[in-house]
């Protein structure tokens, strides 16, 4: 019992948060390169502040990130030392197609990822590839307005075809879009959307989401045609909403809040927009821009597995004055007095993890893949050079235990587990470096000072033992 043989233990990253090297080897400019550090970051990420080019005197953390572009061999060797069975990474679209619509791909970009995959294979690590983790070529954003344009589907499919053909022998697990429901919360980051004064923002977001959903279904079709062994997953920013009280209105609010996330995955997993989703879209004076054939494409090409991120549960209240009381991965949540919080106010709820896992499995009855979980925390280097990150071990231990119970006691099928930011990386929400998730420390601060030196934390050795014992020894 417990974790099945071959359970995919590992860690996860995203190109823009680790690679750096944004001007290397012909890479083009992407939305994520224009995400500044500091107060403006949220405004740019939500599409409220338009930023078109790199500005002087502004610090953009992704430009060097943790220099994975030049450190990948060392980093993958460290992951192998922990015993990783899988490594989740994403492709920077603009390394392959710098503008997004060129005739031919950029060989240097293709080679970079090929080298990474081969390096992984050398250690028996299975790559888990997010085709699109919050990045979009600026050229396409300026030309088409991001994913609000249907033309994006063709550009994306061109990228995907190149990836599937080139990496046919190297990659089996693919995710189409990272946290697709993030479109409603961080639209510039998730879909390259920026808004005009007075525009119906919901219409733009629904349109962009529909295009991503159609693209995701087309990718699934192509993946299975090119190699029947390919496994395609959708990806949800998960974390169930609890009602603040047993007042029916609070329960109803929680149900509606959950649906605002589930509706995307419902389409990817079941193959159609549920009735409630179409009604919700109507209530926002918007509509789904179906064209002929879309419904069939969605219906025939559902995903093989459901992947998701989980950091915390969330709380809904029917009383509007409660508003956003705490952070939960950019989502609004009412404060939960029964839980502790991280230094960034994200509430810690291992049982909520088991609840979320069960809700997803009840709903879809497809294998799950936990592709992000972890705690962002400040780490201190002790005088003897060690990093005693017991708080991280504590968080992960409780969450792995909850996942184990979901498997053993509830019978859920889970393919694998990748902790977020297995190596320290740039925070997506805040751009900080000090919000660290890793087993491997990187010497770099919020303002870009540091040597990029890697240091193994206490959790490095702990996770190694967890993997070695296939999750049996969590002590
Ligand atoms: C998820 C994203 O939303 O949460 C990651 O997929 C992100 O890209 C992670 O980094 C943690 O959020 P943050 O804001 O702490 O980086």
Image: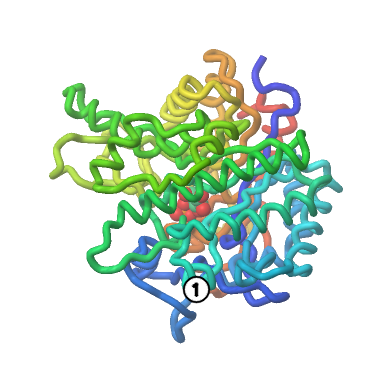
* Residue 394 pos. (x, y %): 51, 36
Residue in the picture at 75% in, 53% down: 76
Residue 168 or residue 18, whichever sits in front = 168
In this rendering, position of residue 243 left or right of residue 83: left
Determine the residue positioned at 61% across, 44% down.
Answer: 218
User: What's the residue at 66%, 72% (across, down)?
Assistant: 27
Q: Quadrant of residue 337?
A: top left
Left or right: where 224 falls relative to 58: right
Q: Residue furthest bottom?
A: 56
Residue at image location 15% in from the left, 42% down from the top: 320
Q: Position of residue 283 (x, y in %)?
A: 23, 41
Above or below residue 232? Residue 111 is: below
Q: Residue under circle 1?
A: 60
Task: Determine whether, in the image, residue 93 is placed left or right of residue 48.
Answer: right
Establish if 51 lies above or below 15. below
* Pick the front one: 335 or 97: 97
> Residue 354 appears at what percent x and percent y?
47, 25
């Amino acid at each position: 019992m417990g974790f099945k043989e071959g359970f995919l233990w590992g860690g996860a990253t995203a190109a823009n948060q680790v690679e750096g090297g944004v001007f290397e080897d012909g890479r083009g400019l992407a939305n994520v390169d224009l995400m500044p550090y500091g107060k403006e970051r949220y405004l740019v990420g939500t599409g409220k502040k338009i930023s078109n080019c790199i500005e002087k005197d502004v610090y953009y953390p992704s430009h060097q990130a943790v220099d994975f572009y030049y450190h990948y061999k060392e980093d993958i060797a460290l992951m192998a030392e922990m015993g990783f069975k899988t490594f989740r990474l994403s492709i920077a679209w603009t390394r392959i197609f710098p503008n997004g619509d060129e005739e031919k791909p950029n060989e240097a970009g293709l080679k970079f990822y090929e080298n990474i995959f081969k390096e992984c294979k050398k250690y028996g690590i299975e790559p888990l590839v997010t085709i699109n983790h919050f990045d979009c070529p600026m050229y396409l954003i300026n030309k088409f307005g991001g994913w609000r344009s249907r033309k994006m589907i063709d550009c994306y499919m061109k990228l995907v075809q190149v990836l599937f053909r080139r990496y046919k022998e190297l990659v089996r697990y693919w995710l189409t879009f990272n946290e697709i429901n993030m479109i409603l919360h961080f639209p510039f980051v998730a879909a390259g959307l920026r808004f005009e004064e007075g525009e119906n923002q919901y219409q733009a977001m629904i349109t962009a989401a529909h295009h991503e959903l159609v693209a995701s279904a087309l990718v699934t079709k192509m993946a299975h045609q090119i190699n029947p062994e390919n496994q395609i997953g959708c990806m949800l920013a998960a974390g169930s909403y609890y009602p603040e009280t047993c007042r029916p209105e609070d329960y109803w609010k929680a149900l509606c809040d959950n649906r605002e996330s589930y509706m995307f995955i419902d389409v990817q997993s079941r193959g159609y927009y549920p009735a409630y989703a179409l009604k919700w879209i109507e209530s926002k004076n918007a509509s789904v821009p179906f064209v002929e054939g879309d419904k069939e494409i969605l219906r025939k090409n559902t995903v093989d597995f459901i992947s998701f991120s989980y950091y915390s549960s969330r709380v809904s209240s029917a009383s509007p004055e409660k508003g956003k009381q705490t952070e939960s991965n950019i989502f609004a949540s009412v404060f939960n007095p029964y839980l502790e919080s991280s230094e960034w106010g994200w509430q810690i709820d291992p049982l909520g993890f088991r609840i979320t896992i069960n809700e997803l499995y009840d709903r879809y009855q497809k294998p799950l893949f936990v592709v992000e979980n972890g705690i962002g925390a400040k780490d201190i280097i002790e005088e003897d050079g060690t990093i005693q990150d017991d708080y991280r071990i504590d968080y992960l231990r409780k969450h792995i235990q909850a996942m184990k119970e979901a498997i053993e006691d509830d019978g859920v099928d889970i393919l694998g587990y990748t902790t977020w930011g297995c190596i320290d990386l740039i925070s997506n929400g805040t751009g900080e470096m000090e919000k660290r998730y890793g087993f491997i420390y990187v010497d770099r601060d919020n303002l870009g000072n540091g040597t990029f030196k890697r240091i193994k934390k206490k959790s490095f050795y702990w996770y190694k033992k967890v993997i070695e014992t296939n999750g049996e020894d969590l002590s």
